[in-house]
Amino acid sequence: MKPKSVVYVNYGSVTVMSNHNLKEFAWRLANSKYPFLWVVRPDIVMGESVVFPREFMEAIKERGFITSWCLQQQVLSHLAVGIFLTHCRWNSLLEVVSEGAPLICWPFFGDQQTNCRYSCTTWGNRMEINPDVKCKDVEALVKEIIEGDNGQRIR
């Protein structure tokens, strides 16, 4: 893996989303063409089991890895991690700031919106996804952080 090329995605242990949002994130990650590690809990979809389409699994087989759990601090400290797509809980923010990776934030509830705003205005190390996960948002932000001037500035 090239340094700063992997997208690490983790929405924590409490956040849930619709099946539609899960599939939007999945296809945007697949279409971004970047390698990724995605932590997907079995209960992340509200009231449903997580099932990814066969076409998605085929599209990511060379560069996407999905797991139900990982040691986040170890992942964030790896040189290949270039972006952390997160829900913005405080512990996640502290871990990523200590490692210096840029954030793509998708705050969901509680302190997450405040943490997201603080991360942007005070630390300047994040970009935010539209709450309804527009199709091109994830792809565009990933590309901007890995390849663009904003990504270099954020680092």
Image (cartoon, rainbow, N blue to C red):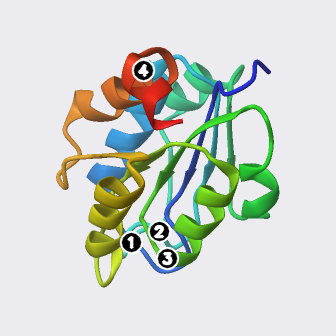
Amino acid type of the residue tagged 3 in the rendering:
Trp
Q: Which residue is depicted at the point 41% across and 16% down?
A: 148
In the image, 61 versus 72, the foreground residue is 72
x and y percent of residue 125 in the render? 43, 47
Which quadrant would the N terminus be assigned to in this image? top right
Tell me which residue sits at (72%, 19%) in the image. Answer: 62
Callout in the foreground (1, 3): 3
Quadrant including the C terminus: top right
Mark 3 and mark 2 residues within 8 Å of each other at the beta carbon:
no
| Crowding near the residue tagged with mark 1, few <14, some 14–19, many ≥20 C-alpha atoms within 10 Å | some
Label ID, residue 143: 4
- Reading the image, the residue beneath label 1 is 16
Rendered view: 141 above or below 131: above
Residue of label 2: 44
Residue type indicated by callout 2: Ile
Mark in the foreground, 2 or 4: 4
Q: Secondary structure at mark 1?
A: loop
2 and 1 marks in contact (CB < 8 Å): yes
Callout in the foreground (3, 2): 3
Q: Give the mark nearest the N terminus, 4 or 1.
A: 1
User: How many neighbours does mark 4 have within 10 angstroms: few (below 14), some (14-19), or many (20 or more)?
Assistant: some
Badge 2 marks a residue whose secondary structure is loop
On the image, numbered disc 3 is attached to which residue?
Answer: 90
Could one spot residue 70 in this view of the protein?
no
Give how far apart the Cα atoms at labels 2 and 1 are: 5 Å
State the mark number for residue 150.
none
Instruction: From the image, state whether disc 4 or disc 1 is nearer to you.
Output: 4
